Image (cartoon, rainbow, N blue to C red):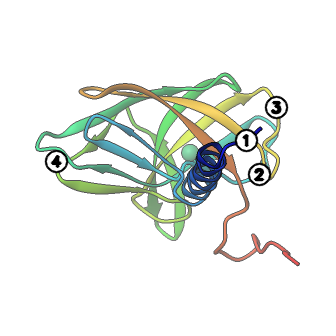
Amino acid sequence: MQTLANQIRLIVLLVLAHFFFVMTAHAHGFSIGQLRIEHPYAPPSKHPTVAGVFFKSIDNKGRDADELTGASSPIAQTVELHQMHMQGDVMRMRAVPAIVLPANSSVSFKHGQPDTFHLMLIGLKQPLIDGDRFPVTLQFKRAGEVEVMVWVQSPKEGAGSHSHKH
Ligand SMILES: [Cu+2]
């Protein structure tokens, strides 16, 4: 027989579980030390073996600068750190050895913008399909290593990437 106390406990647990679900569903982010990695995402693959991984931002709330020095993922042979830059009218990307995260700052890793950073998955072992999730381990000089979950989703803005939702 369920006592009232047990019923209340169950309701509290359900409410907390729901709250946790809502939190994780909407605030998809990861922390390590003073760093906060906001919303790791990747557009569905267009290329069979290469894909970009983006973040809304990486925020460094600390008093010391840090550096993203590398990344790895079980779904790719290698992961490079890339920077977008304009070459005339053409947006290009180049590999960089490390990405500096200044103290008390927010660094953009969004797609489709000049002078922003992203990760490049090279040697993809599987295509990225909308709705998939996969792990990426980030290596930081000061903060150490953290595994984040990347959500595969079509970008909301940008021509040619319009998604039909009913
Ligand atoms: Cu790239």
Q: Does the residue labelled 3 lie within 8 Å of ligand 1?
A: no
Q: Is residue 46 left or right of residue 100?
A: right
Q: In this view, does 40 lie to the left or right of 126?
A: left
Q: Which of 56 and 7 is in front in this view?
A: 7
Q: Mark 2 points at which residue?
A: 44
- Which label is found at residue 103? 4
Q: Which amino acid does label 4 sit on?
A: Ala
For image coordinates 80% across by 72% down, the residue present is 163
Against 116, residue 33 (above or below) is above
Circle 4 residues within 10 Å: few <14, some 14–19, many ≥20: some
Q: Which amino acid does label 2 sit on?
A: Pro
Rendering quarter of residue 51: top right
Q: Do the residues labelled 4 and 1 touch (CB within 8 Å)?
A: no
- The x, y position of residue 158, in whole percent, is 65, 74
For image coordinates 60% across by 51% down, the residue present is 8
- Which label is found at residue 126? 3
Q: Is residue 46 left or right of residue 29?
A: right
For image coordinates 77% across by 44% down, the residue present is 132
Q: What residue type is labelled 1?
A: Gln
Circle 3 residues within 10 Å: few <14, some 14–19, many ≥20: few
Mark 1 and mark 3 lie on one chain; the one further toward the N terminus is 1
Instruction: Tell me the quadrant of the picture where the N terminus can be found.
Output: top right
Q: Which of 134 and 81 is in front in this view?
A: 134
Q: In this view, does 33 lie to the left or right of 158?
A: left
